[in-house]
Amino acid sequence: MKKIVCYILLFITIPSAVTPVLAQQNKVQNELDSLLTVTSKSSQTDSLQTLAFLRISDIYTFFVFDYKLAVEYAGEASQYAQKANNKVLESTALRKLGNIYYLRYIYDKAVEYYLSALKVAEESGNKQIVAHSLNNLGNVYARMAEISNPKKNYSKALEYHLRALEIRKNDSENRVHSLLNINNAYRGLKQYPQAIRYLEEAYDEYVARKDNNGIDLTQTSLGEIYLQWAKETGKTEYLNTAEKYFKERALGERHSSRTSSVLVYMGEIRFLQKQWEEAIHFYKKGIELAKATNELETIKRGSFQISSTYKETGQYKEALEYYKLYRTYKDSLLSEKSNNQITELNTKYETKKKEKDIELLTKDNKLQQADMSKQQLIINVFIGILVLVIIVALILYNRFIIKKRLNIKLDNTNKLLLQKNELIEKQKENIVNSIDYAKTMQQVIIVQENDIQKIFPDSLIFYKPKDIVSGDFYWSHKTDDGKAIIAVIDCTGHGVPGAFMSIIANTLLNQIIRQTNITTPSEILSQLNYAVYNALHQNKERSLSDDGLDIALCCIDYKNKTLEYAGAQHPLYILTNGELKIVKADIYTIGGGNFPSKKGDPKSIKYTNHTLALEAGMRLFLFTDGYIDQFGGPEKRKFGSGNLQRLLLDNKDKSISELNQIVSKTHEGWKGTVAQTDDILFIGVTIDL
């Protein structure tokens, strides 16, 4: 009886779920048929034809997703608007074309049509239409700024949005949208005071309207700006202001779709204040709420932040757990985006395929009627060919029998080879999966790029492992008294052996610097040398391991304006006042049994401590030998330190971000088709006094 009831409910539920979708499709199809009927009548006015074509273009854009037809009908609308000499409709049609190309990510074409729409709108004298065109241009340049040339494109977006605001100053509804757009452009340009000014105007407008969603949007955005400003400047007052805006959103009774994101931001504030437990508390609350509302981006960001917090407190197991969660949601977001694109493309493909099939069937019917008189001739020719084929088949049959016997033997051999290949592939897959997991563990344990950029905001990192995991890594730390320590380390070998050695070296550096608070570079290297010697049992008579590492390490004392450096095999390059200074490293490596004659007490090895005065704008470059040892160029030789020095001097006036691209492109150009020689790590930091 229960099964019968379930079947009845199933047959009732399915039609009720499908009916609204079918009804919507029928409604759109009926509207489209009616509009096409209007456009087919020559008696209609040009203005009415324009409006019909504009609506048809909208249907193909937002319901059918056939952008090609959407462009064709918007183009028809533009032509009829010109015939009617209606500048408002013509500008609207041109903006429609720009919108379609904007949705297709073809931004240069979108700009072309938006500019044409602006010109026609200005000729019409209709200020509202002019403002719409200016707003479209601002939006497309803001989108372009997210891809390339942010300063240039955000400046262009700002220009158009400011012009739109001037026109909309008495238009309350549209004015607030222009204020938000201007705020977005200033944020992109990192001009935060101006961004805050326009965002506060928008906030006042929403308060006057009693628009809770708008109030929530602007308060959250103000908090985001002050938080970013605090990260870039390190100023406590900006962090406090950000917390003020977030606190009501995070702790109040009124929640919105932004609450989970705000909780994660509160966690970031506590992280910056080094209140680790509270930071973790907010991160977990934000992630939990985001899971309930399926906000994947917030889950991804919160998971990454909580992983970083656990890592900072030395809780590596928990850090790894949340890093895996971050990777899962990161992959999920990419997969969802790809699936949406595939679904849309597949829908378009099936539609085009059906149209093509109908076209082919029509052509086939015509051909059948035209060829009826030739069928008898074709049959006769076919019989002749068939007889010939039979004769050839008899000749070939004998050869087939012989080849079949040989193929049986060959098949047995191939099956054996296939089984062996499958076994090899499976073993290879297991090895690669293990190394990938090792890479994840190495990424969690060792310092990451954003950790360095917190200490040195104006910095570049060119990091290119030779294999999946690397023996090169970087390390940084900021002491409680404000000193900044940065190092690049090159462990023996590369790949898995180098990665194991990098984890050992990272652990020893944490013990020496973080736990014992030693900050003198030469003393750090001496302690590290002795620690590696003991950890790898590199005794006087017989060494169980010759592994070791090379290192360049700097300690920047902002208070006393001094720079201390010590190096084992790796020098320090300093670019200041247009000149490049090279501070040489000591010849002794760290560990590896490289003591005099490979014997003696490791404590007898002393490293030189270089002390220099800090200068504003001074740039420090630390690197492993992978960059200069790369083979390539016309003569397939090493890049060499001379080429690197010329590269830095030739680009001494470039910004650090531009230099980052130059370092990468120079390496790729030199390497060409030659295989990568070794792990590569190149770091540059600008000293900001």
Image (cartoon, rainbow, N blue to C red):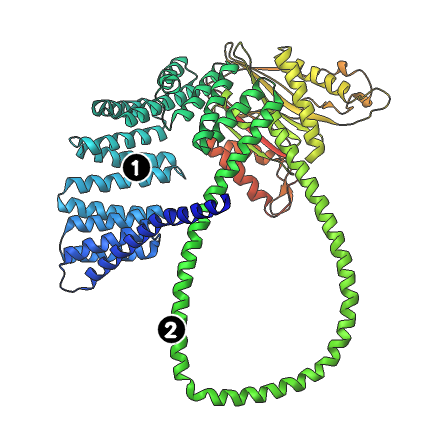
At 85% from the left edge and 24% from the top edge, which residue is drawn?
A: 542
For disc 2, the neighbor class at 10 Å (few under 14, some 14 to 19, many from 20) is few
- CA distance for labels 1 and 2: 52 Å
At 76% from the left edge and 64% from the top edge, which residue is drawn?
A: 411
Q: Quadrant of the C terminus?
A: top left
> Is tag 1's residue or tag 2's residue first in the polypeptide sequence?
1
Marker disc for residue 362? 2
Say which of 641 and 525 sits in front.
525
Residue 366 located left or right of residue 577: left
Q: Mark 1 points at which residue?
A: 156
Is 424 drawn above or below residue 285 in the view shown?
below
Percent position (x, y) of residue 410? Answer: 77, 65
Is 33 drawn above or below residue 114 in the view shown?
below
Asked if disc 1 and disc 2 are in contact, CB closer than 8 Å, the reply is no
Residue 603 located left or right of residue 490: right
Percent position (x, y) of residue 92? Answer: 21, 48
What kind of element bears circle 2? helix
Is 19 drawn above or below residue 500 in the view shown?
below
Q: For the residue marked with disc 2, what is the amino acid?
A: Thr
Q: In which quarter of the image is residue 433?
A: top right
Q: For the residue marked with disc 1, what is the amino acid?
A: Lys
Please name which of the two marks, 1 or 2, marks the residue nearer to the observer: 2
What kind of element bears circle 1? helix
Residue 185 located left or right of residue 629: left
Q: Quadrant of residue 316?
A: top right
Percent position (x, y) of residue 643? Answer: 58, 36
Question: Is residue 654 visible to the viewer in this orientation of the structure?
Answer: no
For disc 1, the neighbor class at 10 Å (few under 14, some 14 to 19, many from 20) is some
Residue 363 located left or right of residue 168: right
